[in-house]
Amino acid sequence: MPCVGDWLNNPLSIVQGFFAQNVPNSDWEKKVTEYFKEKLKENNATNWVPSLNDVPVHYLKPNSLVKFRCMVQDMFDPEFYMGVYETVDPNTNARVLHFGKYRDVAECGPQQEIDLNSSQTVTSERQTLYCVPVPGESAWVKEISFLTLASQARVSPSTSYTPSRHKRSYEEDEDMDLHPSKQKEQHMGNRGGGDIHGCVEPKRLETEAPAGHHLISPNCSPPLDLNFPLPGEKGPACLVKVYESWESFKVNDVLEVYGVLSVDPVLSLVNSEERDSSALDPMECMDTAEEQRVHSPPASLVPRIHVILAQKLQHINPLLPACLKEEESKTFVSNFMSELSPVRAELLGFLTHALLGDSLAAEYLILHLISTVYARRDVLPLGKFTVNLSGCPRNSIFTEHIYRIIQQLVPASHRLQMTIENMNRSRFIPHKDYAANRLVTGVLQLASNTSLVVDETQLEQGQLDTTGVHNVTALGNLITWQKVDYDFNYHRMEFPCNINVLITSEGRSLLPSDCQVHLQPQIIPPNMEEYMSSLLTAVLPSVLNKFRIYLSLLRLLDYSISDEVTKAVEEDFVEMRKNDPESITADDLHKTLLVARFLSLSAGQTTLSRERWLRAKQLEAQRKARLQQQKCVNGNEL
Amino acid sequence: MSSPASTPSRRRGKRGRGSNPSTPQDARSPPSQKRRADDSTSTGDLQPMPTSPAADVQSPGAADALFSSPPQFRHSAIPLDFDISSPLTYGTPSSRVEGTPRSGVRGTPVRQRPDLGSARKARQVDLHSDGLAEDIVATKQSGQKLVIWGTDVNVASCKEKFQRFLQRFIDPLDKEDEDIGLDLNEPRYMQRLQEINIVGEPFLNVNCDHLRSFDENLYRQLICYPQEVIPTFDMAANEIFFDRYPDSILEHQIQVRPYNALKTRNMRSLNPEDIDQLITISGMVIRSSQLIPEMQEAFFKCQVCAFTTRVEIDRGRIAEPSVCKNCNTTHSMALIHNRSMFSDKQMIKLQESPEDMPAGQTPHTVVLFAHNDLVDKVQPGDRVNVTGIYRAVPIRINPRVSSVKSVYKTHIDVIHYRKTDSKRLHGVDEETEQKMFTEERVKILKELSKKADIYERLSLALAPSIYEHEDIKKGILLQLFGGSRKDFTHTGRGNFRAEINILLCGDPGTSKSQLLQYVYNLVPRGQYTSGKGSSAVGLTAYVMKDPETRQLVLQTGALVLSDNGICCIDEFDKMSESTRSVLHEVMEQQTLSIAKAGIICQLNARTSILAAANPIESQWNPKKTTIENIQLPHTLLSRFDLIFLMLDPRDEAYDRRLARHLVSLYYQSEEKMEEEYMDMAILRDYIAYARSYVNPRLSEEASQALIEAYVDMRKIGSGRGMVSAYPRQLESLIRLAEAHAKVRFSEKVETIDVEEARRLHREALKQSATDPRTGIVDISILTTGMSATARKRKEELAQALRKLIQSKGKSPSLKYQQLFDDLRAQSDTAVTKEMFEEALRALADDDFLTVTGKTVRLL
C-alpha cells in the first residue's frame, strides 16, 4: 500500500496503480477520486497538503499534491485530450498503455513513440478555469491558514523552505531569487539545459524585479498581465483543469481545489516552438500570439493544477469549519452561539470606539457586516444592506482607518477611493478581449461577500469622462441590483454578485444606498492616527478572532418569521400608515424588515421576535431623527 | 494539419450511431473489436471488419469496376485516364481549361473541397504505404455490396438514394425564407438545379431536415460520415445536373452543401463524440482572420535541367525532392511560388450566442475554418448558423521533445453558413425569430392556454415581487403579447402599429424601475435605457467611421436594437426635448428615418415602449392633471395606449396586504416562491409562442362590440359638448383586444377580449385622464393637454377680463399689476397669476390688446 508520502508527493504513481489494475474499463477514474477523498478525510490530512496560496510555486515539487484557494476569474474553452494512449517501442514493438488524465504532457520513455493511430486511444474532455487568489483577501486570512499549515505539517517537499519566509518583505524576496533557481535546476536537470532559460525568466517577472532584467533577456515579451481584479494583488494565478462536473462552477465562485501540480517546463517550450513554426504553417496558427500567451503562459508563472477534488467554498474564513452542514461543525456552531451575546457586546463596543463613540452607527455597521444576499425575487436581490455613513470628516485619515478596521474583521475587502482620477482611469467592469480571447478583469469582479468600502470623501468637483460615467453607473447598478453587466463587446452579460458596499461620505452619497446613517462623533481625538492604532492593538488577538467568527458565521444562518409576528408587523405597519401616511412607505417597511432581520441574526436568533421588531423600529426612528436633524442644521443641504 | 490520429475519435463517432447512446465513460472502455461488433449488429448487413484492413483488400480494379464513371470519383488516387478530376488541377479556372470544351460532367473542372479534404489526404498517404489506393477498401458482402472502409456507406446505393431524393422531394408545407419563386408542389431541389443553371453558382444547399424526412438512413450516414457521403452527393448532383443541362457552363462542378443538421445545436454540448461528424451550431462571429493562402500543391523546378515536378502538401509540409528525377542532380529543385497552387482559407472565431449560455459562465468559443468562396462571407458581430465537420487535431509532435502535449486542437471546417439575423435591419420578413419549441413544450403551453384563468395567472406570474398593481401588470402583459400586425400599404396607409406603448407615472419609490427591469430581463430583445443618460443618437442610430477601413458604418441605437422587442425607458420625464422628439416617429410609424453623413435610410423600429416618468414636483399632485404633473407634450402622450398611474393608495386593507406580502418576501425560502408562481421560463416561452404563432383577427361580434365601445366613449363627452375619444383610442382598443386574444391562443378576437380591453383602457383612463377638478374621465386632457372644463374656465376668465377692461373706459394703457388686482377682487374664485396671464394672452390673440412689459395697451 502506498504510504503518506506517496499520495502527497507522487499522486500520479497512485493513479498509475489504479490504472494498471483496472485498465480495460474506466473504473479507475472513480477509484482514484474515492481514494483521495478518503485520504483527505483522515485526521487533518487537508492540512498536510501544501497550499499554493502560502508556498511559492518554486518551492513545491512538480507533480505533487497541492491545494489552492481561489476565485474563478475566467473560463477557457473545454479541451480534448488523450485520456488513454499507447506508446510503442519501435525496436521491440512493445506496446504500453498510459493514462493522460491529470497530465499536461503525454509521457513516454526515451525509446518510445506515441502511437497516435492506436485503437486504444480514448479522447476525453476537460475544462480549464483561470483562477486567481480570492481578490482582496485580508492578510489575517492568509496568516491564519498559513499558521495552521505550519503547525501541523512540515511538508515542505524537496526544499529547505521555512515558513517564516512568508512574512518576509518584498525586497528580501529578490535576494532569494537566485537560490530557488538553483533548486529548480536540480530537479529539472534531466530535461536538458535549455529549459532553465525558459523558466527562470518568468519567475523574475513574478517577483517583478527591476526593469533591468529586460536587458538580460531581450526576447522576453512584456510581463504578462495576470488579470487580478484588484490592483496591487500578488500571488499565483493558476490554470485549474477540471475533469468532472465543471458545469457547476461559475465565474467568481470561490473554490478550494486539491490536485496535481504541473509545472512541466515543456509546456512553455512547446509554446515557443509552436510560435516559431506558426509562421510557416498556417494550419497551426489558429490562435494569435497574444492568445497563445494568455492561454498557455509559462508554467512557472502560471502553474497548472489537475484537479482531483474540488469544492465550492461558502466562505473563506479559516477560523470556521469549511462546511457548516457536517456533524462536527454543528457542535462548533452551537458552542459559539452560547457565547454570542458577550461577543456582540464587545464588538459593538469596539466599533463604537472606532466610530468615535457613535453607538448607533456602530449598530448599523454590525448589521451591514452580517448582511448577505440570501435570495433573489425575479430581479430584486433580497438581503443586501448598503450603508451610507455620512458625516465623515473630509480629508482626514478617518475613513482609511475605518477601512483598516473592517479589513481586520472580514475575510475579504477592498477600499475604493472615489477620486475623479480613479473613476476615470480604472476599469470597473470586466470586458472580453477578443484578441486574446479572455475576460479582462475589472475592480468589480469580486467574490461573494467581499466588503467594498467606497470612500466618497475623496471626491472633488471635476469632470467625469465616459469611462467615469460608466464606472459610476456600474457601481450604482451593483448597489441597487447586486449585479454587474460584463462587457462582451457585442453584447452585455449580467453576472449576479453579492458584495457588501459601505459608502463613507460627507453629505449624502451620490450613489444609491439602502440606508444612510449620519455619523455623530462623541469624542474628537486630538490625534486620530494614534487613537485608531491604539484601538487595534488594544484588542486581544483571541477576541479579534471571535469577532471574525461572529461576522462570518451569522451570515450563514437561516432566518424565518412566524405567522404571529407577521400579523403583528402588519398591524404595526397599518397603524404607522394611519398616523403618518406621508412619511411611511412600503420602502420603509422594506428597510425596517431588513434591519429586523439582521438585528435578530446578530443576536443569534433565527426567528423574528416582537421585541426585535420594536427594537428595529426604534433604531430606524433614531436614524431618521438624526437625518432630520442634520437637514435642519444644513438648511437646504439635503 | 490533420493526421491519422483523428481516427481513434472517429471510431467512437461511428459507434455513436449504434443503438446504445454512449457516455464518455463507456466510450473509453470498449476495445475496437467490440465496436466493430456493434457496427455490424446495428447495420445488419455488414460483416465484422477485419482487424487489419490490409488483409481484405480488393484490387484497385474492383473499385474501378464499382463506378461506372470513374471520372466523377474524385477521391481516387489511382491515375485516371485524364487528370481533370484530380485535386491537383485546382487553381485559377482559366489556367486549366484551355482546349477542353467546358460543358458536361467531364468538361467542367472539379474544384477541390478543402472543407472536406484535410483528413482524407492524410489517410491516403498513410494507406499508400500499405499498398492501398485511397480509403475505399471494400469488403466483400453477401450481395456484392461494397462499403467505404470504416463506414457502412455503399457509394452506389448512397448516390442512387440521393438522386432519388433530389428528383422526388416535395414538401408543400415547408416554406423557407429563401424560397422565393419556388413552386412548392414541384420537386424542390430540381428547381434549385435549374436555378444553378440560370445563375451559374455551382452550389446546392440541401436542408438536412428534408433529407431526414425523406430517408432516415441516408441522413444518418450523412451526419456520421460527412467526409465520404458529401462527395458522393456531389457526384449524384452533378450527374443529374449535366444530364439535364448538358450544355451548361459552370465554373466548376456543383458542390452540395448540407445545412441544418440536427445533431448539435449548442456549442456547449459539443463533445468528443462529435468529432468528424456533421454538426450545425449557432453562435456569433467575434473575430475573423485575414485571408490565408494555403498551399495545396508545390511546384518545383530543377535549376539545372529545368525539369518540373509537383508535390502535394502533406500534413502542412512539403516533401522537397532532394534529387532531380531527370538529371539526378542533388539539391537542385527550387520552389516556384507563382506556379504553386493555393487555396483561400480563413480562420473565424465563433462565440456561443448569449441565449445559449447558462448563467454565471463565460461563453465558449470555437474555431472555424472557411475555405474558398466561404471566405469573408461573415463579419464579426454576425449571428450565424454554421454547418460543418468537427475536427480534432493533436498538437504537433515536436521532433526534439519526446513528450507530446496530450491535448487536441479542435475546429470546424465550414460547409455552410446561414446568417440568422441578416434580415433584421431590412425588415422584408415578418418574424425572423427562429425559436424552436419542442413538441412537449408546445403541448404544455397549449394546455396552459386552455385554462380559464390564464390571463390572471400570467399577470400574477409577471414580476411577483411587485405587489398588486394588477391592472398595470395586465397592461404590461398585453404589451408583451402585442396586437396583430396589419398591412394597409395597398390602401396607402402603410403599416398599422401592432405594438402597445405604455407609460407608467407616479410617485417615486413605487417600484416603477423594478417593473421595467423585470420586463427588460424577460424579453429576448429588450433594451433598457434611462432618459437622463440617453441622447437622441443613442436611441436611434449613428454613423461612425471605422478607424481601420475608413468605411462609414451605421451603428444602431437602443430603439433599433429592440426591434420586435420592448424598449424600456426609465426617467422618461428627464429626457431632453430633442431626444423625445425622435420617439414621435417610432411610436406611431414604427420606423426611424436617418439622414446623415451621406446615409439616408429608414430603419425598422417596431418596438413597444414601456416608459416610466416621475411627476414634475417629485410627488404626484392630485389636484393637477396628468399633463400638468408630468409636463410631457400631449402629442407624445396620446401615442401611449395606456397610461397608468402608480400611486401609493392610502387604504388600510391595502397596507395590510402589502405588509404581509413584504414580510413573506423576507423569510420564504426560494423553492417555495417558485412553487407559487409560474416559472419565468414558461412565461417567456408562452409569450414567444403566442407572438410567433398566434395572429388573431377580429370576429364579427367583436367588431360590433368595438364600435359600440367607441361610440360609448364618444358619448360620454358629447353630453357636455366635449369629445372624449379619438380614432387613436379606437386603434388602441383594437390592439388591446387582439393582445388579449393572443393570451388565450385564440385566432379570433371575441367579445370577451374587447370587454377586457375596454375595461383596462377605462382603468388606465380613469387614473390618468381624470380631470381633477370634475372627476370625469376626459380624453381631451391627453389630446390637447387641457381638460374641457379648464378650457371653458379659461374662456370665461378672458371674457371677464375683457369686460373689466371695457368697463375701465377709454384709457389706452393699463398697469399690469393694477389690472390683476382688480380682476382678483372682482372674481369670486381664486385667480392665479398664470390664469391671469393666460387670459391676457387669449385676449392678445384676439387682437384686443398687447402686453409690453408692465403695461397693457388696448388696440
Image (spheres, rainbow, N blue to C red):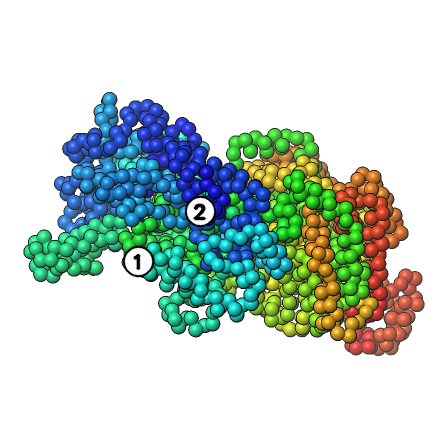
Q: Position of residue B785 (x, y in %)?
A: 74, 57
Quick one: SS at disc 2?
Answer: loop
Whether residue A301 appears in this view of the structure is yes
Q: Looking at the picture, does residue B845 appear above or below residue A604? A: below
Q: Is residue B126 left or right of residue B714?
A: left
State the count of labels: 2
Seen as rendered, the residue at the extreme left is B327
Q: Disc 1 and disc 2: Cα gap in Å?
A: 35 Å
Describe the element under mark 1 as helix, strand or loop: helix
Residue B767 in the image: state x and y as whole percent. Answer: 77, 49
Say if mark 1 contacts mark 2, CB within 8 Å.
Answer: no
Residue A521 left/right relative to B741: right
The residue where tag 1 is placed is A277
In which quadrant of the rendered image does the C terminus of chain A lie? bottom right
Q: Quadrant of residue B849?
A: bottom right
Q: Is residue B520 visible?
A: no
Quadrant of residue B140 within the rendered picture: top left
- Residue A467 on image: x %, y %: 57, 65
Left or right of residue A511, residue B803 in this image: right
Q: Amino acid at mark 2?
A: Asn
Residue type (three-letter) at the residue carrying disc 1: Ser
Provide the residue designation for mark 2. Answer: A10
Residue B471's mark?
none
